[in-house]
Image: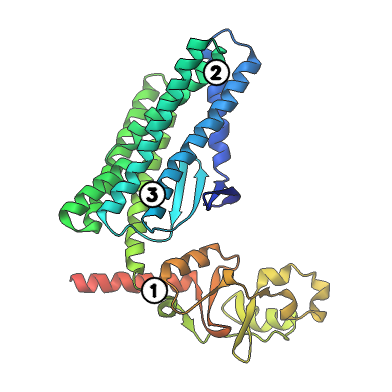
Amino acid sequence: MRGFRIGSVFGIEIRIDYSWFVIFVLILWTLTRGVFPAAHPGEAPLTYIFMGLSGTLLFFASLLAHELSHSLVARSRDIPVHSITLFIFGGVARTTSEFETPGDEFAIAAAGPVCSLAIAALFQALAWISAATGLPEAVTGVASYLALINFVLVVFNMFPGFPLDGGRLFRAAIWKRTGDVRRATRIATNGGKVFGYMLMVLGFLNLFGGNGLGGIWLVFIGWFVRMAAESSYVQHVLRRSLEGAHARDVMTPDPLTIDPGAGLPEFVEDFVLEGRHHSYPVAENGRALGVITLDRVRAVPKADWPSRTVADAMLPLSPDIVVQPDASMADTMQKVNDSSVGRVLVADGDRLLGIISQADIARWLERQRLREEVSAA
């Protein structure tokens, strides 16, 4: 997911994916034009806009609190949490390691529903107080809606299908009983797929029954749950494959480098047009200096190429594009994915040892898969 940073809470970076704006507008429109006018008729149009905007913002604040509860419990169990990203279907916390025990999984998964249940109770209490003290109906309506939607979120999340919270609790229980986390993940993932198909079937029934909007939502959510279940299993297997692997195991050693004093025309003609890649490490006497890419050269006006060198256009060496040879593959993959040049240098200090691209990682993963097949045969 791509997005931008909006701040941090308890030292955890909060990001918004661009897809979040789609669901924000849809929920705002649904509340303003449908839910609140139907539940509280006779209010002014501006009141419905206020109710819809406040309800939408507080709903996403509730989702953020839900994800924060997962993250804070994870940190309390020494599982680092890098960030939380809000996207089209809610939020996701990005950790840098897997759960070590079923107990960790259970505690972290349970934190979310408990938090959402507490939020639902809080808004329900606010709705009762608002009604009893004669506050505007708009306040009561928004509070009642938020109480209901957070309770529905709890019920939805407790279905025993991965990657829902209920699926994680289910996986923890199977993991505890069998001692096999991969088997537990596979069973819980199948539960998630079944749940996704159930939602899709229910959505189609709603479509044929005349509830077009509700049916489309259920089909869409069901499809997402099914895809998320499959993706979560693949990510789990991937992370387990990466355990014990380091950057030095995956890197291409002694890569072809370019001198910082080389001209830009030389780089394009001799390295890009005659070579196999569009980016290369920049090094001098074995000392890494940065990375030069065709895109970096294109950013320089072509008329200036003859007077500019690789050093002028390269991406200078920085922690974002360098890993130590003993760096874990989980951290290395994350750096490769986040890198603006799609690769990282492996260096001991500033001494260049190798380079890792997405192609290197793909080849290494394929070798790991073949090893598993041979071992299982």
The residue tagged 2 is 139
Between marks 2 and 1, how big is the CA–CA gap?
Answer: 57 Å
Please state if 312 lies on the left or on the right of 135 as rendered: right
Query: Is residue 213 at least partly visible in the picture?
Result: no
Label disc, if present, on residue 145 of the rendered structure: none
Q: Is residue 233 visible?
A: yes
Choose the circle earlier in sequence order: 2 or 1: 2
Asked where in the image residue 78 lies, by quadrant, the reply is bottom left
Give residue 73's mark. Answer: 3
Q: Are marks 3 and 1 in contact (CB under 8 Å)?
A: no
Q: Secondary structure at mark 1?
A: helix
Q: Which x, y percent locates residue 77? A: 36, 55
Residue drawn 46% across the image and 67% down it: 331
Name the residue at 79% across, 77% down: 305
Are discs 2 and 1 less than 8 Å apart at CB?
Answer: no
Q: What's the amino acid at mark 3?
A: Val
Query: Is residue 220 shown above or below 127?
Result: below
Of 373 and 87, the residue lying toward us: 87
Residue nearest the observer in this picture, 197 or 143 = 143
Amino acid bearing label 2? Val
Numbered marks: total: 3
Q: Which residue is mark 1?
A: 364
Q: Nearer the viewer, residue 308 or 347?
A: 347
Whole-angstrom CA distance, mark 3 to mark 1, is 33 Å
Mark 3 touching mark 2, by CB under 8 A?
Answer: no
The x, y position of residue 11, in whole percent, is: 53, 53
- Does dot 3 land on a helix, a strand or a loop? helix
